[in-house]
Image (cartoon, grey):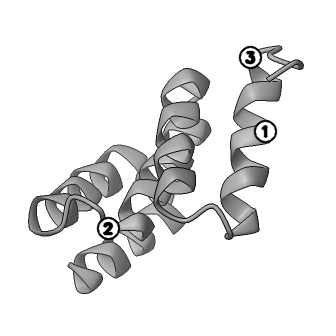
Amino acid sequence: DKQLVLKGNKLFNQKRYKDSIEIYNKALEYNGNNIDAIYMIGRVFYELGNFAEAEAQFGKTIKLDNKIIKFHVWLGWALFKQNKYQE
């Protein structure tokens, strides 16, 4: 599943967001707790302007590992974009 995440990242960097999410979902078929795939799915939704779904994905990453700062930062941005300042 690590190779799938790397392939998805390549597509993400090319702004091929819908293609990348398909690859990340394939990685999750192998390991439903693949934190890198979940995080990148959050990033895809964020880039597509689906901030509620991005929030959900970043929330999942924090439940898996709450010590990684970037998960909290991206969750904060997703909340901010939804005007959820009190969260």
Q: Quadrant of residue 49?
A: top right
Q: Position of residue 42 (x, y in %)?
A: 50, 46
Q: Give left or right: position of 16 versus 74.
A: left
Kindly identify the residue that appears in the image at 60 percent across and 38 percent down: 46
Give the mark toward the camera: 3 or 2: 2
Say what secondary structure mark 1 lies in: helix
Kindly identify the residue that appears in the image at 50 percent across and 51 percent down: 63
Report crowding for label 3: few under 14, some 14 to 19, many 20 or more residues within 10 A (C-alpha).
Answer: few
Can you tell which mark lies on residue 82?
3
Q: Residue furthest left?
A: 30
Kindly identify the residue that appears in the image at 87 percent across and 18 percent down: 86
Sequence order check: which comes first, mark 3 or mark 2? 2
Quadrant (top left, top right, bottom left, bottom right) of the N terminus = bottom left
Q: Mark 3 to mark 1: distance in Å?
A: 9 Å
Q: Mark 1 to mark 2: distance in Å?
A: 22 Å
Q: Which residue is mark 2?
A: 34
Sequence order check: which comes first, mark 1 or mark 2? 2
Does the residue at mark 1 contact the one at mark 2 (Cβ under 8 Å)? no
Kindly identify the residue that appears in the image at 20 percent across and 66 percent down: 27
Give the mark toward the camera: 1 or 2: 2
Q: Amino acid at mark 1?
A: Trp
Q: Give left or right: position of 2 versus 13.
A: left
Say what secondary structure mark 3 lies in: loop
Q: Amino acid at mark 3?
A: Gln
Front in this rendered view, residue 81 or 65? 65
Q: Please say if 77 is above or below 81.
A: below
Front in this rendered view, residue 43 or 70? 70
Can you tell which mark lies on residue 64?
none
Sequence order check: which comes first, mark 3 or mark 1? 1
Front in this rendered view, residue 14 or 73? 73
